[in-house]
Amino acid sequence: MIIKTTNDIPGSEITDPLIFRQRRIILKAMASMMLTGGSLRASWGDTPQAIWNNLPKSPLSGDGLDLTPAGHVKNYNNYYELAFNKEDPSGLAQNLRIDPWSVEIGGEVEKPGIYHLEDILRQSALQEYVYRFRCVEAWSMVVPWIGFALGDLLQSVQPLSTAKFVKFTALYQPDTMPKQRSNTMLEWPYVEGLRIDEAMHPLTILAVGMYGDHLPKQNGAPLRLVVPWKYGFKSIKAIVKIELLKRPPISSWTKAAPNEYGFYANVNPAVPHPRWSQNSERPLGSGFFTPRRQTELFNGYGEQVAYMYRDMDLRHFF
Ligand SMILES: Nc1nc2c(c(=O)[nH]1)N[C@H]1C(S)=C(S)[C@@H](COP(=O)(O)O)O[C@H]1N2
Ligand SMILES: [Mo]
């Protein structure tokens, strides 16, 4: 797969016509909102519902995947800033303040800055991406995310040749996040990282929605990472900062338990977690008698991503 890395190709030349058309729809809607909405600055949260319902489906979406019922995805969450239990974040997350939202982008880039989410969205080609998602705890789901390629955002700030890794930092808001307030569970804020080629890979997206609507707060609103071939903890929620770095960042989970949660965290059924097998998984919403699903290497995305790891020993690189 060829990944464009040059900065000198104008966006219009590399943008597929469908995406271009859809970008115009959003621009038009944003413009009319600013004229009629009464507020001077359109907030990203005001994006009309019609836009979310009619997005083009990314060709990267898996064929014939059975979507996990939305209710399961919205009510069974890992959000350790909020709670240890998976049933609690859907309620607790409603206290988070997420609008207005901006993302600080810096480090080894030509154009560092603080970017408002509405400006990021205005220049982004939103699409629906249907991906499998596999938590390291051996449950899994299939989610129709709405988002855009992280690589497009990174290209727009013009990475320097010294940018080898990307560090992501999540929201720190202790007055609304109980585990940050009590300073327990992990070191806060939540931090994750990718190698630059992983971050630029077309499968890697920033999601702002799912199931034809805005992202629920408990699923990482307003902006979260989705890296479908890696264990779920890499897909950091509520991103406030993106830094391009020369050296690998240390993620929160690696810091907490380096022998259990490595930097790469590529899904691999042959490498057990020290405390459980990764050989199979429980699809969310499946009945008691439904057989577990066999976990796939790179969560089934090997054809697209295996080339990035061809020099690594797959038995040990977790
Ligand atoms: N900020 C933040 N991001 C996070 C987490 C978290 O605790 N905090 N949990 C991770 C884990 S372990 C998983 S499996 C997924 C769960 O995403 P979901 O709740 O949307 O299913 O979010 C990931 N991103
Ligand atoms: Mo997870």
Image (tube, rainbow, N blue to C red):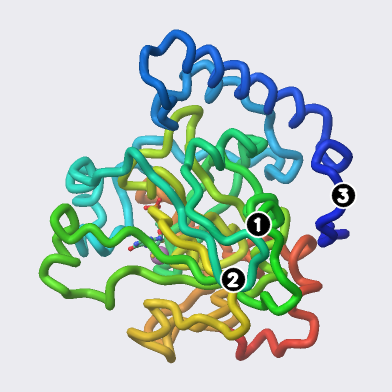
Determine whether, in the image, residue 172 is placed left or right of residue 33.
left
- Drawn side of residue 15 relative to residue 43, left or right: right
Q: Which mark is residue 9?
A: 3
- CA gap, disc 2 and disc 3: 21 Å
The 10 Å Cα crowd at callout 3, few under 14, some 14 to 19, many 20 or more, is few
- The answer to whether residue 301 is visible is yes
Single out the residue that lies furthest toward the top. Answer: 36
Instruction: Give the mark nearest the N terminus, 1 or 2.
Output: 1
Q: Considering the image in quadrants, where does the N terminus appear?
A: bottom right
Q: Residue at x 21, y 64 (%)?
A: 84
**Residue 229 image-quadrant placement:** bottom right
Residue type at mark 1 is Val
The first of marks 3 and 1 along the sequence is 3
Residue that badge 2 annotates: 244
Q: Position of residue 284 (x, y in %)?
A: 41, 49
Q: Which residue is mark 1?
A: 157
In percent of width and height, residue 178 lies at 14, 60
Amino acid at the residue labelled 3: Ile
- Say which element carries label 1: loop
| Residue 92 location (% of width, % of height) | 18, 47
Say if disc 2 is inside 8 Å of ligand 1.
no
